[in-house]
Amino acid sequence: MPSEKLCPDCTEPLEQMELQGTDAVGTLSIVSAASDEGFLSSVRADEILTPVPYVCPECRRTLVYAEE
């Protein structure tokens, strides 16, 4: 079970939200580049991650995490 995500500004627990699109582009995803460096270097090139937004109910800061 993943640990609770906290706001880096006010340490309140973040609430998971859902991305909504109004165009015909399709589903958003994060795909690793073929690079051996960078913060996604441990992600395989064929692994696709989904961007998941989290919002702080106190200060309204929004963070987007790449999740499977």
Image: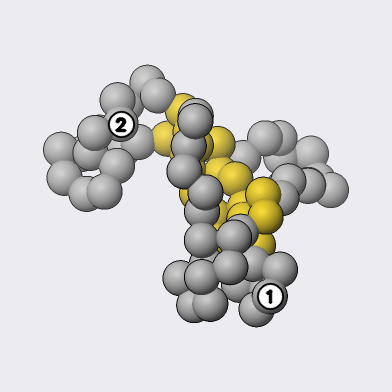
Q: Is residue 50 above or below residue 65?
A: above
Q: Is 52 on the left-hand or right-hand side of 5?
A: right
Q: Is residue 58 visible?
A: yes
- Depth check, front residue: 32 or 13: 13
**Location of residue 26 with respect to 47 vertically, above or below:** below
Give above or below for 39 relative to 56: above
Task: State the residue position of label 1.
Answer: 58
Disc 2 on helix, strand or loop? loop
Mark 2 surroundings within 10 Å by alpha-carbon count, few (fewer than 14), some (14 through 19), many (20 or more) = some
Q: Which amino acid does label 1 sit on?
A: Glu
Residue where numbered disc 2 is placed? 43
Q: Distance between the Cα atoms at labels 2 and 1?
A: 33 Å
Q: Which residue is drawn at 15% across and 38% down?
A: 36
At which x and y percent is residue 16?
67, 49
Give how far across and how far down residue 64 sits, in percent: 54, 55
Question: From the viewer's perspective, is residue 12 above or below residue 36?
Answer: below
From the top left corner, tell me how far across and down residue 17 is, in percent: 71, 50
Q: Residue furthest right?
A: 22
